[in-house]
Image (cartoon, grey):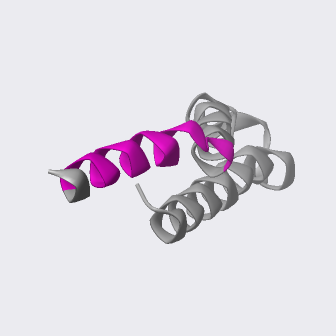
Amino acid sequence: MNFISRTLTGIVMVVVGLILITIPMFVGAGRFFLWIYGIPLLILGFFILFNKSEDKIEKIKTERRKNE
């Protein structure tokens, strides 16, 4: 995943995760099941947003192809 797609995906997942976490606070007590989806989505979004080791792997693959 390159920088732009990683950033967009991470930001979208974090925003949707935050929305799913905050909905039960304002709507009512019956919607706490949304936390089951919101919390993992928020964690995955942060992981995708701040994971830079994947870009290093891609650089190695592209450099290897250039040398051949």
Please say whether residue 55 is one of the residues in the magenta stretch: yes
The structure residue drawn at horizontal position 61% and vertical position 44%, both measured from the top left corner, is 52
Q: Is residue 7 left or right of residue 27?
A: left
Along the line of sight, the residue nearer the viewer: 35 or 32: 35
Q: Is residue 18 left or right of residue 36?
A: right
Q: Quadrant of residue 51?
A: top right
Q: Residue furthest right?
A: 25
Q: Is residue 58 above or below residue 9?
A: above
Q: Residue furthest front?
A: 67
Along the line of sight, the residue nearer the viewer: 33 or 50: 50
Horizontal and vertical percent position of residue 56: 50, 43
Please say whether residue 48 is one of the residues in the magenta stretch: no
Along the line of sight, the residue nearer the viewer: 20 or 24: 20
Q: Quadrant of residue 66?
A: bottom left
Q: Is residue 2 above or below residue 57?
A: below
Q: Main secondary structure of the magenta part?
A: helix
Q: Which residues are magenta?
A: 50-65
Horizontal and vertical percent position of residue 35: 67, 33
The structure residue drawn at horizontal position 33% and vertical position 52%, both measured from the top left corner, is 63
The structure residue drawn at horizontal position 68% and vertical position 45%, both measured from the top left corner, is 50
Q: Is residue 3 above or below residue 55?
A: below
Along the line of sight, the residue nearer the viewer: 32 or 37: 37
The structure residue drawn at horizontal position 40% and vertical position 54%, both measured from the top left corner, is 1
Horizontal and vertical percent position of residue 19: 70, 57
Total marks placed? 0
Horizontal and vertical percent position of residue 8: 55, 68
